[in-house]
Image (cartoon, rainbow, N blue to C red):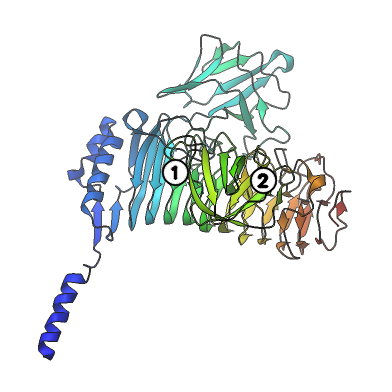
Amino acid sequence: MIKHATSFILVFLLIFTPISARKVKVDLSESKYGLEAANRQGLLSSRLRIVLDSIHSTVNVDDEVVILLPKKAVWQFHSTDAAQREVYISNHDQDQPKRTGIWLEGWKNLTIDGRGTEILCHGRMLPLSMVGTTNCTIKNLRIDFANPQIAQVEIVSNEGEEGITFRAAPWVKHRINSAGAFEVYGEGWAQTPFTGIAFEKDSRHIVYRTSDLEINLSGLTCTGKNTYHAPNWKDERLKPTTIVALRSYYRPHPGIFLADNKQTTLRKVTVHYAEGMGLIVQRQEDITLNGFNVCLRGKDDPRYFTTQADATHFSQCKGKIVSIGGLYEGMMDDAINVHGIYLKVMERIDDRTLRLTYGHGQAWGFAWGDAGDTIRFIKSKEMQYLDNAYTLKSIRPADQSEVKGCKEFIATFNERLPLEIKGEGTYGVEDMNWTPTVHFKGNTIRNNRARGALFSSPRRTVCEKNLFDHTSGSAIVLCGDCNGWYESGACYDLVIRKNKFINALTNLFQFTNAVISIYPEVPAISRQTKPLHGGKLGSIVIEKNLFDTFDTPLLYAKSVSGLRFINNKVVKNTDYQPFHFNQEPVLFEHTANSEAPGYQPVKLQNTVK
């Protein structure tokens, strides 16, 4: 009897116990994959797509797969060979389709080890994407473009009202077009820059008090090899030897795109250029950046710029965002921006149903929330949350049949909604489930345009032991905006500690009222009865930081409660002349229950009682 029972158990286990996951290793440098020949022929992207699809189709779903790239190779990706896909990317221009290089979709337990390989792109394209993956890692990889859309020039002479003579960098493909204007071009693209950022040649700092340049490159005459006189470009601040990154505001593609993934790690991955963000992450659950860089190719790199926009950007994510040990320099926007997305309430269909729409032209076309999520409503002009939260029963596209490419949703709630929510764009909605914790530690941010770090999450955020070196604008910003960018939300649990700030605010951009600027966009702040950010005393703590600065403003805080600015050290230098419009070390506007021992914070008249 016992023998028969034992046999039955063994048979049961053999039938119903899953086969253990395999460890599969694939070396793409092997000749059988044909990638070396495809690389020489300019057909690598299409060939690699076939190889990866084949590997994916043959492994089991729970296998641990390691794909090895050739050691320290240079892989040439051409936009003409890239697959075209309809891809909607937050905070980017939504022209379609996108030409894509490596596209990893639906993978699980995958590691791609670049082993020092560089992906060198030609044309306009999206080099690397991961969509709908779980527990995947990319490491030891670099991404760059052979001919960036940002065009670098050097000022040869400045003749004041007679214009400017400049020399294009040797790698810049350029010509004078039929209209007599300076035009840069590459594989499948051409454009005339109309703005730019000026860099000091030796230090690589952005030139003091230049911000975004207005540039007119019409009516050119050629005066030598790669050298032109621009009679309509007039700017006395640009001295000879100044390096200018000529650009537009177009941002079609990031360097790396992550969407709808779980547990992603990027380790020792570097982006040298992208015509958008270095890394954009949307609808992601848990991500770790360890030694992720958006940086130049070293101290001898002749380029002065990296990406067209932010180095890293996180939109509508949840779980943990961890970013440690990164180098972010030369980008045309922030090192990190973490936020959710406010949708606008456009129509009240019934007491439980609303029509919602994306508010910003660069953030739409993808899923926003899920049934069961907790939703809060906010008065847009006052940036004032309603007291109660509500549960999303269902959400579906309103303007078309599928989510991809949609701009509007029909959202139904379990509860009756307040009568005051009537639509017409006066209210916004925030999905509290899609909000992350953030740990930003040990990173270096330097010589970039606009700002250093932006945090907009109600969950625990820690920014510590980072170096903010000549961030040009503010080093750290807390925003929250349901009127322009539609980037949510309020910060309730934030620590900024043991960071070093060196000469922030050499230029002024949006939200840059102090080295640390808490600046939500609140058009009707006089009607606000409760601050947006913070809570009880100590909900926002700024402590043990070092401010090495030439100017006065350290902290500006608007619509905040419970802030503590304590035990910070200030060292004044004479590197630049003070010029900021705010000449208060600590300035509070519409704040409550906040303190800055050792300072006498100036409080504007509309401070909350």
Visible residue check, residue 25: yes
Q: Position of residue 218 (x, y in %)?
A: 60, 13
In this rendering, position of residue 1 left or right of residue 463: left
Residue tagged 1 = 256
Inspect the image, locate mark 2, and give the three-letter code of the amino acid beneath it: Ile
Inspect the image, locate mark 1, and give the three-letter code of the amino acid beneath it: Ile
Q: Quadrant of residue 229?
A: top right
In this rendering, position of residue 118 left or right of residue 521: left
In this rendering, position of residue 453 left or right of residue 40: right
Mark 2 and mark 1 residues within 8 Å of each other at the beta carbon: no
Q: Secondary structure at mark 2?
A: loop
Visible residue check, residue 299: no
Residue tagged 2 = 421
Image mark count: 2
User: Badge 2: how crowded within 10 Å, few (<14), some, or many (20+)?
Assistant: many
Which residue is rendered at x = 37% and y = 52% of the image?
A: 133
Q: Position of residue 368 (x, y in %)?
A: 51, 47
Q: Position of residue 362 (x, y in %)?
A: 55, 35
Q: Point out the image quarter for the N terminus.
A: bottom left
Task: Return the disc, 2 or 1, that comes first in the chain's sequence.
Answer: 1
Q: Quadrant of residue 234?
A: top right
In this rendering, position of residue 205 left or right of residue 369: right
User: Badge 1: how crowded within 10 Å, few (<14), some, or many (20+)?
Assistant: many
Determine which of the numbered discs, if any, sits on residue 46 in the image.
Answer: none
Which mark lies nearer to you, 2 or 1? Answer: 2
Q: Point out the image quarter for the C terminus.
A: bottom right
The answer for how far apart the CA atoms under marks 2 and 1 are is 39 Å
Q: Nearer the viewer, residue 96 or 382?
A: 382
In the image, residue 180 above or below residue 426:
above
Which residue is rendered at x = 71% and y = 17% of the image?
A: 159
In the image, residue 229 above or below residue 398:
above
Outermost residue toward the bottom in this view = 1
